[in-house]
Image (cartoon, coloured by chain):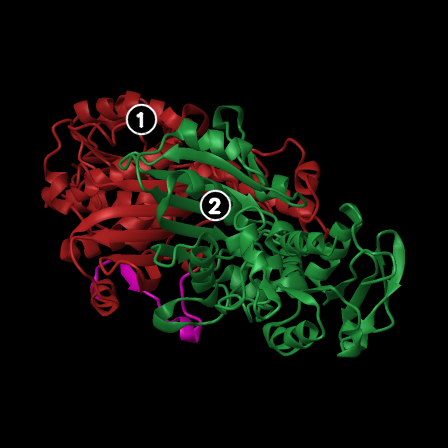
Chain colours: A green, B red
Amino acid sequence: MSGTGRPTLAVVGATGAVGTVMLQILSQHADIWGEIRLIASPRSAGRKLAVRGEQVEVVALTEEAFDGVDVAMFDVPDELAAQWAPVAAAKGAVVVDNSGAFRMDPDVPLVVPEVNPHAARLRPRGIIANPNCTTLSMIVALGALHAEFGLRELVVSSYQAVSGAGREGIDTLRRQLKLVAGTELGTHPGDVRRAVGDDTGPFPEPVALNVVPWAGSLREDGWSSEEMKVRDETRKILGLAKLPVAVTCVRVPVVTTHSLTVHARFQAEVTVDGAREILATAPGVVLFDNPAAGEFPTPADVVGTDPTWVGRVRRALDDPTALELFVCGDNLRKGAALNTAQIAELIATEFV
Amino acid sequence: MSGTGRPTLAVVGATGAVGTVMLQILSQHADIWGEIRLIASPRSAGRKLAVRGEQVEVVALTEEAFDGVDVAMFDVPDELAAQWAPVAAAKGAVVVDNSGAFRMDPDVPLVVPEVNPHAARLRPRGIIANPNCTTLSMIVALGALHAEFGLRELVVSSYQAVSGAGREGIDTLRRQLKLVAGTELGTHPGDVRRAVGDDTGPFPEPVALNVVPWAGSLREDGWSSEEMKVRDETRKILGLAKLPVAVTCVRVPVVTTHSLTVHARFQAEVTVDGAREILATAPGVVLFDNPAAGEFPTPADVVGTDPTWVGRVRRALDDPTALELFVCGDNLRKGAALNTAQIAELIATEFV
């Protein structure tokens, strides 16, 4: 810990898309940290980035970079996290990791502060995992409903923003939009594909004027890794190891903010009024649901904000135990940087 | 009937977005018609449109316009259809109507030729209804699976193209795309909305760089009219009056071709191989499902084609009786003009 009595925080992966939002959030939140150390790949070392109104020099990722660090937030690719998080933990830091490397490790808690903050206390490896952005975009709302009604089944479809694939995803959509805007494209077989050519960036298909039913890599039986993450992580966070979860993940031409349709079945009858009451008072949730007044969340409104926005709350017409929801969450904020920062802040209270 | 022995066809609403595709389809299909008469509003009368390689003059919508007509395909707003379809029927024409005016009328069959062609025979009012485009984008695939496995429950989410809202929908997306392409918009609260201003056309929110969880008008308990159509029409076409159907309809920035995620539960266990075999041989369906080779349908590939494309076929991991599918269909072709033309062609065989 630094001489000020406040814990020292390291931000590993400070120069990435999520890292950038992380530094914004640290600058906006109550300043509870002593030193904030910025760590990135050796080629970024020496760059200066703004945090808390000061320019801070980025240092290279080495074992020594974790000297005196109390809490280390990681946002780096899975294989780098797998290698370096244990190094930081061995040096005494509590690691909060946003990669997929540790999320399903039984000795690593998967934490959403509004839903299962207690889980952060038991961390035998000194590592806490941050959930995937798609799971995080809905889990705060679902956690609140589960606490009251008891979740029994989920059917989820995603409308995922391109920034889920990082800066390259954003750049790809922007390049493609320039090629299709001002044209008559989108009404003839293959015309968008011909205009975009092979420049599909991190996506398997053009994403401008299109939707692409694929995110991540191929898992068994035709499932995508993103779909498996939503299922497995939802079960782990809610502590429902056998919850039936059916997911289809689809990429849409939105820059930032994931949306999801949710069909949620509960233990007993639910009412829309009851669900609305819970959502209206749940921490981290905004209920925005008045279609008569044109009110329902969309990414254009939600981007840049912290909460999970919920609208289109309906009871299933043919099943009094099920609710339909439309949920939006900024995938770079609550979906990544914000939740990581919230976990780090939760840990910081242990140092007081 | 005209002197040639072939039935006379009227196309009512020939100048609209669907009417335009209707004339293309009539020009491409086997030429079974005698006269093809084009009918539209009085302000379009006198215009000439190409059909079967000839320029045909549009006549105004009057009672006399139906003199000698055997089959009349209607694509006009609900209130015009409600007024004029009975007029055409009273003059002896079999009406195939693509509006919402008659779909749930118990004396009007709702027909998809691949699924329930027999229903077209019993038409006490002389009117046959064509389903809504969103229902049509999935129903051929679902009908084939239902025939084999027996459908027990559906949970559906849509990714609907802007042309579902007609030419105005297409023009609105194209105007908005010009405003957002080449910018850094989409990462700050409200930035897309400010750029687009109040110019949201037929949509309640900006549709470029956004998804909008609303289609149609407000029904009871927060449901949209589009969602109720998908539920009610699916039940009527499949003859399953009590089928539980949960639907959320969402507009996406795609010009043409609706996509849907489908969670379908059946009477007994299903296998992916069994489902694939049915889909691979079902008339009007293309199975395009090999994620390892990057094969799954997207609107960019499907637009302008006739079939229902199905990919991402998976068995639910937690329910051996349920399948997950991603389905795409051109909402102006199979979703509107093509199915209407197929019904008309089915009726035409009665005149041989």
Secondary structure at badge 2 equals helix
Q: Magenta segment, which residues?
A: B281-297
Relative depth, front residue between B258 and B268 = B268
Let me know if residue B270 is in the magenta part. no
Which residue was labeled with disc 1? Answer: B81
Say which chain tag 2 marks.
A
Image location of residue A174, percent across then percent down: 66, 57
> In this orientation, does residue A192 appear?
yes
Which residue was labeled with disc 2? Answer: A143
For the residue marked with disc 2, what is the amino acid? Gly
Relative depth, front residue between B318 and B216 = B318
For the residue marked with disc 1, what is the amino acid? Ala
Q: Residue at x 73, y 51 (%)?
A: B183
Secondary structure at badge 1 equals helix
Let me know if residue B288 is in the magenta part. yes
Image location of residue A254, percent across then percent down: 59, 51
CA separation in Å, label 2 and label 1: 47 Å
Say which chain tag 1 marks.
B
> In this orientation, does residue B130 appear?
no
Relative depth, front residue between A150 and B101 = A150
Locate residue A202: give its quadrant.
bottom right
Category of crowding for the residue at label 1, using alpha-carbon neighbours closer than 10 angstroms: few (below 14), some (14–19), many (at least 20)? many
